[in-house]
Amino acid sequence: MQRIATLGCLVLLLSSFLGGMAEAKKPTIGVAEFSNTSGAAWWRGGMGWELSGTVSNELSSTEKFTVVERNKLEKVLDEQDLGASGRVKAGTAAKIGKMTGAQYLVFGTVTSYEEEVSGTDGGISFGPISLGGKKENAYISVDLRVVDTTTGEIACSRSIEANSSGGGLSLGANFGGFGGNLGGFEKTPAGKAVRACVIEIVGYLECVMVDKDGCESEYAAKEQKRKAKTKSSISLDE
């Protein structure tokens, strides 16, 4: 019985040790304030950090990352006068990493936003509630880059795109999911496009930073398709 008890203790210790190793292997990541160069009408003060917080929450929910709290990261980035620029020198990156514990810093810029609303007959509206009468589509693009704080170099980068469409019932109130200013757009095409973009961002980071199980080829194919689509839409005069 004593031998069995000793063996059981060893198993528990080994499990605890392996669990600790697995926990230590999680990338420690901080998401900086997002910036916006798209001119989107819905973007307003504070949304950069709200979007950062949404991405942080999604990353944390995967249980594959250790996410640095916003208040800790925001203070350090402000001290280094970085904000949402993402321009980090090696020495500065190392200092930020040491002060926050972040191995990686995520920077994002909303570079494009387009929305199309087409009207139809029969729609009715009352205050913030509308029923039928319109079809809405939205497109958003975010330039994403991840900086390695040990080198100051970009570990990975990608342009993330998302589309949303909607119609029928539209509610202008905040029903959860997003917070702050973003909450008012929860059920709108803009809110849906942002949510889809956040999911794509998190999926990409999971793939290239943690899983690395061949999923990279899927994102490489998406990137090639995006570039081909962009190239086909450009007309150059000879």
Image (cartoon, rainbow, N blue to C red):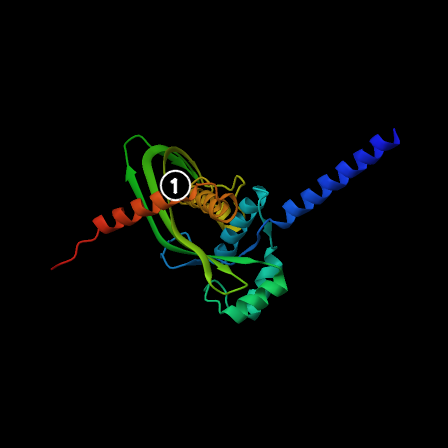
Look at the image and tell me in which quarter the C terminus lies: bottom left
Residue at screen point 57% across, 58% down: 103
> Outermost residue toward the left?
238
The amino acid on which the numbered mark 1 sits, given as a three-letter code, is Glu
Q: Is residue 77 above or below residue 47?
A: below
> Outermost residue toward the top?
1
Tell me where residue 94 appears, x and y as whole percent. 56, 67
State the SS at label 1: helix
Residue at screen point 53% across, 41% down: 177
Tell me where residue 27 appears, x and y as whole percent. 57, 51
> Outermost residue toward the right?
2
Q: Splitting the image into 4 quarters, where does residue 95 fall?
A: bottom right
Tell me where residue 128 appears, x and y as whole percent. 44, 40
Residue 109 visible: yes
Residue 81 visible: no
Say which of 229 and 166 sits in front.
Answer: 229
Residue at screen point 62% across, 61% down: 100
Q: Is residue 21 above or below residue 31?
A: above
Say which of 146 and 38 sits in front.
Answer: 146
Within 10 angstroms of label 1, few (less than 14), some, or many (20 or more) residues? few
**Label 1: which residue?**
218
Look at the image and tell me in which quarter the N terminus lies: top right
Q: Is residue 5 left or right of residue 18?
A: right
Give the number of callouts: 1
Say which of 18 and 85 sits in front.
Answer: 18
Tell me where residue 227 appears, x and y as whole percent. 29, 49
Q: Is residue 47 above or below residue 10?
A: below
